[in-house]
Image (tube, rainbow, N blue to C red):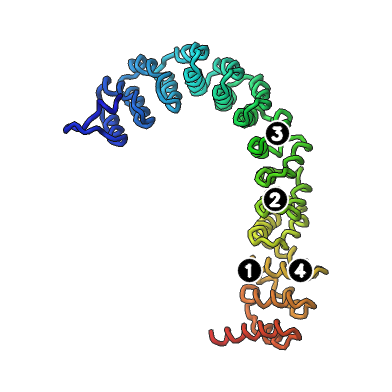
Amino acid sequence: MTTERLHYPGGQAMDATQRLRAVQASTSTEKLTQALEDPSPEVVRAAIGRLVDLRGHAAANALRAALFDVDLSVVGDIAKALQRVGDGGVAEMAIEALGDERSTRRLAAIRALGAISTARAASWLQSALDDDVAGVRSASLDALARLGEHASPAAAPACARLLHDPLPHVRIAAIRAVARLEPHPGALLAPAANDADRLVRLEVAGHVASLPESAAKSLLADPDLRVREAAARAAGTREVGALALLLTDDPAHDVRRAAARALGATRDDRVADVLLPGLEDPDALVRAAVLRALEEILTRATAVRRLCAELASERAERRRVTVYALAHLSAREAAHDLARLADDPDPDVRLALIASAEVLFDEPGALMRYLRSDADPAVRQAAGMWLLRAGRR
């Protein structure tokens, strides 16, 4: 191995970093060819680059000899290097290796075909989708996904067949390939929405906006909270109704927060009414997400006006959380509407006013002096403490 050939002048073996530096400085074709066997992928990549820079097309023989015997993570680098020096035989080598009885060779061939990105490679990669080894099928899916526009129109339906593969990681790779290859993948991906494996459903949840409505609803109501969260993040305008239910009813705060963000991403001012119940969420991060969403769809000034309208709500809890929401926005322009709450029938609303006074009023002293005579002892005490602190300042 190369680690036995590369030594310090005193005979001590080099570590990977020192071997990398030695390769980067080398001008010896022999040593660079030996370095293609190095156990470190970074050293091998450096050797590939140096060989191409120094030898050009003359490096092709050494690179071809190493193509299927290096670490799988480096196969694509060698294939691209051969393509770069004008070696037209790399595709033929890879196609021939697809018939090798050794699965490692077939995997290397797939990596090579995926790296050179030619239309010719696509049909051979599709044939590998029927391989007996799951790793080969999964690698073929990944390679087809990387080919993108170079793949044939038949590639996406061929990949979709593996949505029914017995192994979950192959089904996940199939979702990624179909989503990459098909401009409108929803119909092909729909079966994955009811997959028995949560990781498969988690993967397809990222494409919920393109799925048929029934499949999208299934993912948004999935028993796994991470699947619901992923589906909520990826949802669009069509799913506003489902997102509204998640925002108010889902037991997981991560899901409710994702729903708030997705509602804000619609940029539709009609969604404001759907968002407002989220102001009463027990989780501070959800409430913050609701406020950000309101600002996104309404602009800050319009959001403040919309919140001021909620100060007249019949529900005391809505009035209370609206005070804190306006405080979060430092909405001093709402001071006139807020001052009316000094006579609110609910003491918790008046306490919220005291707690937020410094960010909502330019001169809150008069309000505090008024509330110091409040009928509720807790309000009187809070106002008195505020005045005491203000006096000390």
Q: Which is nearer the N-term, disc 4 or disc 3?
A: 3
Q: Distance between the residues labelled 2 and 3?
A: 23 Å
Q: Which is nearer the N-term, disc 3 or disc 1?
A: 3
Q: Measuring from the top left, give residue 359's x and y in whole percent.
A: 62, 73
Dot 4 alpha-carbon crowd within 10 angstroms: few under 14, some 14 to 19, many 20 or more: some
Disc 4 or disc 3, which is closer to the eye?
3
Q: How far apart are marks 4 and 2 (CA)?
A: 22 Å
- The residue type indicated by label 1 comes to Ser
- As drawn, 255 above or below 147: below
Q: Which is nearer the N-term, disc 4 or disc 2?
A: 2
SS assignment at label 4? helix
- The residue type indicated by label 4 comes to Glu
Quickly name the residue at label 3.
195
Q: Which residue is drawn at 71% across and 67% down?
A: 321
Q: Distance between the residues labelled 4 and 3?
A: 41 Å
Q: Distance between the residues labelled 2 and 1?
A: 25 Å
